[in-house]
């Protein structure tokens, strides 16, 4: 059956795009919205607040590996409904937390539900569209979902002015309820005849096949290394901007938002580029540009030149490339495993977002109180990403 024949009318409209964009934004929203509050949380909770990001990413990474085969077996909508309920419960737990260990626990719980959003949004795109069209759709979703990391830090920075950080997590609980209600309008994209007929236990064996697929893994490792670098900025930037450069938390959101504007712009450009160039070519060029920016950032922070302007400029270039890298690497990888899109998407998400665990731990272990730690982590892992792209040489 052709891809065109498989596209129900209800799954190609504006509502479908908006819901899937919101689902893909769940990860960034769940973290970015409280970034401006992290220094305040660290003082109040008397603990290493970076662990709240680590805990979330641990839960996010592990849970996806469970939900992926389940979604290939049961369809996409049931796991989404359960996931949204878990997210709401976890958000309420975070809002009620009074010490660092409590909030880390509830962040892990929150992630058990949040991970279903981006994972199953990617799988639903692969259910419906072919390789190039899937890359276009992922770029479209990126443009819309980018609103979350722009609005999130800005909203969090304003909320911390008149309310405690607890209010931020109450807001996430409300958003979770709204997303749960929105699933009523979301059609199932994996009909019974295309689901994995084997037991769920048997479905988990597909991970071995995926890990043995060189084409799939080279695309995904490139994306994973890039996201280690990206999460180094996401986790480290509140302390670099607010603590080191003494930028007001209210204005931190604007500096963060600049990067997302770059991602949105490159995602829009990428929609046209994928029609003219192979995905592999676009991926190599985007990672190359990101590598040059990362090296400039590392040199500037090491030599202590350029100040905040250098960091803002180089990170903008580095982050903007995500508009091409994420869409092309994901679409090409899913094309290497079209019959197990749920499990493939789960493994992509587990490695992609689980990579942030590495970033937050490295920052916690090696931070010297200067921007240099963030700089060398970004440069190192962007170089590793470039290395995987060069090695790929696929099609």
Image: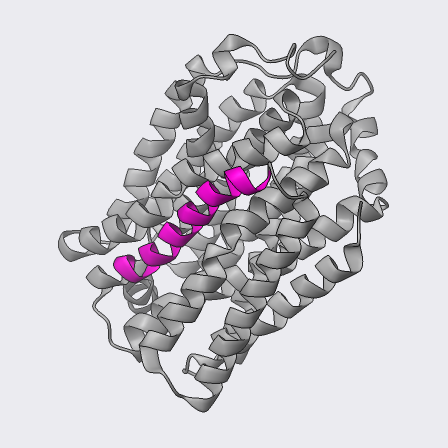
When asked about the image quadrant of residue 172, the answer is: top left
When asked about the image quadrant of residue 240, the answer is: bottom left
Q: Measuring 54% from the left and 51% from the top, which residue is drawn there?
A: 57
**Is residue 373 rendered magenta in the image?**
no
The spot of residue 125 in percent (x, y) is 59, 27
The spot of residue 382 in percent (x, y) is 60, 66
Stretch of the chain drawn in magenta: 253-274
The spot of residue 268 in percent (x, y) is 45, 41
Quadrant for the C terminus in the image: top right
The single residue placed furthest to the bottom in the displayed view is 303
Looking at the image, which is closer to me, 80 or 201? 80
The spot of residue 82 in percent (x, y) is 52, 25
Q: Measuring 43% from the left and 14% from the top, which residue is drawn there?
A: 184
Q: Measuring 57% from the left and 24% from the top, which residue is drawn there?
A: 79
Q: How is the image coloured?
A: one colour
Position of residue 343 in the picture relative to residue 29 (left or right)? right
Q: 233 above or below 219?
A: below
The single residue placed furthest to the front in the displayed view is 276
What is the magenta segment's predominant secondary structure?
helix
Q: Measuring 77% from the left and 34% from the top, which residue is drawn there?
A: 337
When asked about the image quadrant of residue 379, the answer is: bottom right
The single residue placed furthest to the left in the displayed view is 162
């Amino acid at each position: 059956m052709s891809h065109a024949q498989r596209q129900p009318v209800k799954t190609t409209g504006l509502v479908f795009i908006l819901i899937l964009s919101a689902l893909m934004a769940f990860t960034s929203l769940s973290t970015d919205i409280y970034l401006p509050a992290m220094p305040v949380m660290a003082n109040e909770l008397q603990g290493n607040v970076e662990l709240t990001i680590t805990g979330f990413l641990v839960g996010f990474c592990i849970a996806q590996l469970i939900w992926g085969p389940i979604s290939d077996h049961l369809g996409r909508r049931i796991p989404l409904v359960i996931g949204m309920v878990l997210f709401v419960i976890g958000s309420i737990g975070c809002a009620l937390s009074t010490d660092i260990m409590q909030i880390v626990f509830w962040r892990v719980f929150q992630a058990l539900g949040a991970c279903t959003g981006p994972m199953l949004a990617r799988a639903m795109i692969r259910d419906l569209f072919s390789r190039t069209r899937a890359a276009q759709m992922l770029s479209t979703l990126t443009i819309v979902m980018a609103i979350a990391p722009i609005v999130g830090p800005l909203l969090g920075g304003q909320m911390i002015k008149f309310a405690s950080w607890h209010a931020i997590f109450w807001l996430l609980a409300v958003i979770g309820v709204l997303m749960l209600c929105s699933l009523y309008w979301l059609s199932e994209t994996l009909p019974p005849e295309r689901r994995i007929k084997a037991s769920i236990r048997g479905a988990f064996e597909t991970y071995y096949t995926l890990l043995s697929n060189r084409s799939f893994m080279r695309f995904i490792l490139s994306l994973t290394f890039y996201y280690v670098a990206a999460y180094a900025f996401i986790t480290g930037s509140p302390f670099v901007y607010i603590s080191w450069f003494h930028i007001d938390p209210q204005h931190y959101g604007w500096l963060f938002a600049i990067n997302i504007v770059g991602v949105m712009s490159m995602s829009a450009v990428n929609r046209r580029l994928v029609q003219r160039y192979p995905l592999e070519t676009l991926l190599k060029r985007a990672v190359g540009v990101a590598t040059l920016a990362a090296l400039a950032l590392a040199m500037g922070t090491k030599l202590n030149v350029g100040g905040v302007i250098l960091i803002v400029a180089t990170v903008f270039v580095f982050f903007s490339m995500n508009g091409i890298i994420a869409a092309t690497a994901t679409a090409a990888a899913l094309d290497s495993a079209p019959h197990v899109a749920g499990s493939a998407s789960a493994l992509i998400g587990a490695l992609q977002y689980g990579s942030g665990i590495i970033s937050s731990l490295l920052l916690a272990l090696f931070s010297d109180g200067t921007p240099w730690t963030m700089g060398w982590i970004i440069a190192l892992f962007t170089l590793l990403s470039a290395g995987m792209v060069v090695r790929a040489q696929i099609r």
